[in-house]
Every structure is written in structure tokens, then in C-alpha cells.
Amino acid sequence: MKKITVVKFGGSLTKNQEAQKKFIKDLAKLSKKENIILIHGGGPEINTLLEKLNIESKFVNGLRYTDEKTLEVVEMALSGKVNKMLTAELIKCGVKAVGISAKDGSIALCQLIKGLGFVGKPVKINTKLLDVLMKNGFLPVLSSVGIDKTANTVNINADLLATAVAVAFKASKLIFLTDVAGVLDINKKTIKKIKIKNVDNLIKTNVITGGMIPKINSCKDAVQKGVKEVFIIDGASGIKKLNGTIIKK
């Protein structure tokens, strides 16, 4: 089988139509050379739908608290809207895309994270369905909704899901699309390359802060578990040039 690249599409890009079109075109070209698994979140879409339904968003340490009502909305926004939109756009570009969630084929079996309601972290990735799709020339588009051990639906942080899938396939590349140009130093300049042994020090010295901390830890985890290269790139510039930061051993 061709090399596998796992791409995580950031929720903020769903609001930038121009960047989205560029990304889809680039991804369509890339999919001719290698196998792609596209994983997406959709925070802005979830927030919009919650507002429309007058359901208040709750966050615990920056992570969305997901009760039963919120979970319904999460699944509608991610699996129903964002997933089908990305799948349709890829099909328009000639890609054999298939939109599914990480529930399908029990792809992501999760353990609930205490204090966050129906939010889980992947503890097992079943690769069979994704394998079958890729071997038959399909590009899986995966929404970040999985199941727990009793097959209840759970919301998954898309970065965690992308990392778990990349590790399960020992992917050659894991690419995180964000709305910044990679990891920035204290002068707001992009750090082109980070070795995993230096990650802890960059966090300790406050070079890496806030929402970038869990992302960089996901990158470190992926490399330690066999993914060759991880990129954090500016989604608006597309995935052709990989403008941003590379994390490797």
C-alpha cells in the first residue's frame, strides 16, 4: 500500500471559504500519490448550532463539556454537516471520498474523560474499515465522534483522534492544519523544526503556551509512537508547501 498521511482539518478553517477551497484542491492532488485519512473537528459549527438551539456552551479547562443535549448537537454539526460538506467538495474534485464517523466500524473505542461528560479519549483504534476503504481507492473523511465500551456515543478532541489514527497506521506524516503559521517563538516567528526532546523545555520556558500545549504534546506522543514526521501548519496557505513547524525525533 502507498504511504499514509493523516491530515487534521481545523474547525476554524470551515469559516474561511477561500482557504478551504485551496485545501481541498491540494488534498485532491496529494491523494493521487499517497493514501490520505482526513480527520476533522468543527468547533465553530457546533457553537453556531448550539446558539440557534439556545443551548449554553460550557468549557472546563478549555475543553467542551458535553452533556446529552450538547452531544446531539455535536454529532449533527460534525457528522451531519462538516463531514458531508468536506466529502462532497472532495468528490467535486474527482476524489473517491467517503464520509464516516469514528463510530463506524468501531474505529475509535474511547474511555470517558472524568469531569467532561460524554467526552472520550481513544484507547483503541480499529483499523480494518479504514484499511478496506484505502485498499479500494477511497479517501476516508472521519468526524471526531466515537464510542465507549458500551457503544455509547462520545465526543472526541479531533487532535487526539488524528494522533491515535496516525499511530495505529504508523503514518509517514501527520499534519495539523491550524489558523497560525506553526509554533511561534517569543518574537512571533515560526520555529521551523522542533525535536521532541526539546518540547518540555519550550513549554517550561513559556515559548509554547495555551492551546498549543495539548497540540504539541499530541505531536510528541505521535513521534514517540512511530509516526515519522508531524507538521503544524497554517491551513490558509494549504498543505502543498507545509508552511509551519515540523516535529520529529
Image (tube, rainbow, N blue to C red):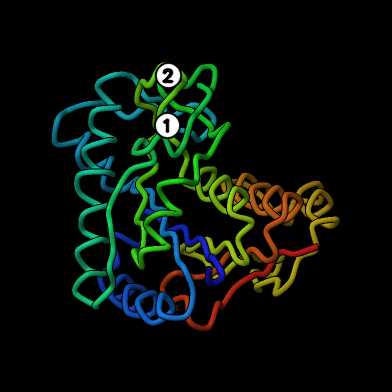
User: Which of the pair 239/3 is nearer the observer?
Assistant: 3
Q: Residue furthest left?
A: 52
The residue sitting at 47% across, 19% down in the picture is: 149
- Among the 4 quarters of the image, the one containing residue 237: bottom left
Of pointers 2 and 1, the one earlier in the residue sequence: 1
Q: Looking at numbered disc 1 in the image, what kind of residue is underneath it?
A: Arg
* Residue for point 54% across, 65% down: 4
Residue 206 x, y percent position in the rendering: 75, 51
Q: Nearer the viewer, residue 190 or 246?
A: 246
Residue positioned 44% across, 59% down in the render: 37
Q: In what quadrant of the picture does the C terminus appear?
A: bottom right
Residue type (three-letter) at the residue carrying disc 2: Gly
Q: Which mark is residue 64?
A: 1
Residue 122, compared with residue 231, is above or below; it is: above
- Residue at the spot of label 2: 117
Label 2 Cα crowd, 10 Å radius (few <14 / some 14-19 / many 20+): some
Q: Viewed as shown, does residue 4 lie left or right of 236?
A: right
Residue displayed at 41% across by 61% down: 134
